[in-house]
Image (cartoon, coloured by chain):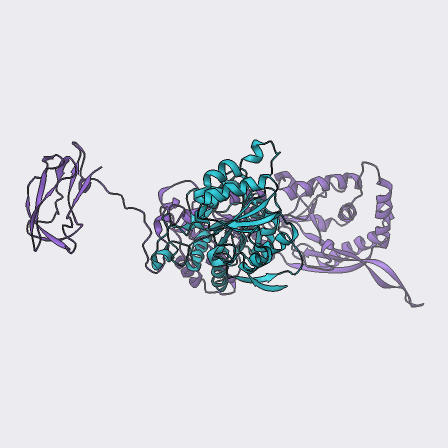
Chain colours: A cyan, B purple
Amino acid sequence: MRELTFTVAAREGLAEEMERDAAVFVMGEGIGPRGGNWATTVGLYEKYGPWRLRDTPIVERGFAGLCTGAALVGGRPVVDMLFLDFMLDAVGEIVNQTAKLQYMSSGRLKMPVVFRGVIGVGHSAATHHSGNYYPMLAHVPGLRVVVPSTPRDAKGLLKTAIRSDDPVFFLEHKSVLNVKGMVPDEEYLIPFGQAAVALEGSAASVVAIGWMVHQTLRACEDLAKEGIAVEVIDLRSISPLDIDTILASVHKTGRLLVVDEDYGPCSIGAEIAAQVIVRGFDDLDAPVMRLNGAFTPIPYSPPLEAAAVPNPQTIAQSIRDLLAE
Amino acid sequence: MAVEIVMPRLGWTMETGIIAEWLKHDGESVQAGDALFTVETDKVAQEVEAMDSGILRLPPDSAPIGAVVAVGTVLAYLVRPGEAAPFEQYQPQALTQPVDVASPVLPSTHVAAPIDVVLPSENGRAAVASPRARRVAGELGLDWTAIVGSGRAGRIVERDVRATAVAQPVPARARVTPVARRVAQQSGVDVAELATKMPGKRITRLDIEALSRSTSNDAASSGLAHPFNNVRRVIAERMAHSAHTVAPVTLTTEVDATELVALRERIKQAVRGSEKSAPSYTDLLTRLVALVLLEHPWLNSSLQGEAIVQHEAVHIGIAVDTDQGLLVPVVRDAHLKSIQQIALESAQLIERARVGASSLDDLQGGTFTITNLGLYDIDTFTPIINLPECAILGVGRIVARPVVIDEHSAQIAVRKMLALSLTFDHRMVDGGPAARFLQQVKRWVEDPYIWLTA
């Protein structure tokens, strides 16, 4: 066991997979000699050179399509989008080609592409550099979407993503990149569709995504002083969604809150609520509640930016409100 | 939808303006592009034109001519023909959360459930329960509609159902705050009774505390209050009456029941596999006592006024412990029935008593009562006479004890011993006759073959 940051753990996973399978290569802006805008490939260019660490011009649609084609003929590309917002330029390729070619070829074609990108609000990244977008991606049949929140999960999920023959979106929140955590020495993979219980409790179930897992745990420290012990579930896998873990928790606690930095309308929380209502109706002691970021393009101004997203105080208050229901 | 006419910002630094003149009047039709009013700033007097068409409506409290008005202030409205101006319509209070500067999340996007501040008890809405509460109520066999909810807007939630299962249920009509209910439980106050004294009032914690204070005995109010049900009331009256009128004396004796136990074991083995059931010890004693009473009629009598009436028949009451309280169904003519008949009948009587289905006939007409507490490891006790009867026999447990068999040779053996306690009414019967009765009961228990062949 070693203590690593999220970035280093993910990079270790990438390095191990590149070592294991020569077909794995990385494409993106600044991922070659520069080592990646978010240090995603530091040290790898020196080891594998420009054939496997391929810098690109600023044309996301181009290299997303290029990697889709490469995957079709045996490559295993990791497409580094830098800020996930930039994938919007490539949505046409991703949705119509990458996501659908396996289906359209009746399974003859495989699509082992990983798209990775940094998501989330913070540091005045503002309107074009703060997106989350995972509900949009989760809504496309054929795409896998994972949002790890710990270094251990980052490495395990990235390795699974690279070994998967399906297109995977591996999303890393800006504020999570420097989070430190223990990572096992031995090889391990984390399967998709598995949520993790980050904290056990009985007063209510709180599902959190990405950076919100850490903010929620901070809120729980305050709530513990008031004698409130909630169960926190790190969703980890957006698509496929581990609804069974959530249902088991709701069966125990009777109350559910989803904490998600992303906007409320058509959110993952809405999807979870709809599924829980169908399968866990008689377990609900209160309506399913959601705490989301403000439905607005993300502000540049620091106080406005802070006001636009949940924080430990608002999360704690939402939990108290849920318990009062 | 009314269009707001506001004080415009006519320059970068303009913060206020003065309405110099209205060029259109209240109720007048306006076309887009018409000059509406003139504004004076410190620099300019400027005409402001309408951007929309409509009927101009000035609110009664519109800024008067010459008043200094902040930029952005609503001055008037343009409405469609026939449309009422906003200041003429009833405006429901918008349900917004107060914008707290310290809590940064913007209220309009905090996706919480709409806040319904109207409580059902105030508008007579039917009880509402969460799905989980209904499920748990079903599991516990409770009627959730009678439970008071502690969730928001009076919603019944799981904790309310579970609390009701433990404490006494509060009738739906009693409006009690959740805190009051908790305090009442802790202080042993009967909320239901309190509610009947204050009809229509919403009972709060202050009411409970006031009642607790008025009850002077702290010890009495520190437990859970259970009001009398019918059975309890009758028992209380009867026991009190008996205790106050009878002159009770209790005689006890220790009986060697080894033979009786052996007898019962043989009967149990004999009936095994057949439809017959083995008689209980109470059944055996019922038969035995009935026969002894025939030889000791003073113990089978009642006091009526100043006459002691000896009964010809023996009807033995059997004390039964039920959920509602003590019931005493009667085995009639126990002196005439066989042990089998007595066993069959007593089983039916006891079952009816346990489920609360005893008839009036079941519970009346006894001339003597047997009460058996042996099941609970009791040895001797002082049963209270079941008026108008004269005596009651208390039966203890049968337990193996070391007993002196032969005093001269100091021989000790283990025998099945049974304690019998006879309470009799000394107004009617003296100690001697009562003791002789008990002695014969003892002899016949020790040697069952005498009365089996009676």
Which quadrant holds residue B434? bottom right
* Left or right for B298, reference A212: right
* Residue placed most toward the observer, B292 or A111: A111
Which quadrant holds residue B30? top left
Q: Quadrant of the C terminus of chain B?
A: top right
* Left or right for A17, reference B295: left
Q: Quadrant of the N terminus of chain B?
A: top left
The image shows residue B254 at horizontal and vertical percentages of 79, 60
Residue at 86% in and 59% down: B415
Count all numbered tags in the image, as a single digit.
0
* Residue placed most toward the observer, A46 or A138: A46
* Residue placed most toward the observer, B101 or A141: A141
The image shows residue B156 at horizontal and vertical percentages of 47, 46
Tell which residue pokes out farthest to the front in this image.
A50
* Left or right for B412, reference B426: right
Residue A135 visible from this viewpoint: yes
The image shows residue B199 at horizontal and vertical percentages of 38, 48
* Residue placed most toward the observer, A236 or A61: A61
Residue B134 visible from this viewpoint: no
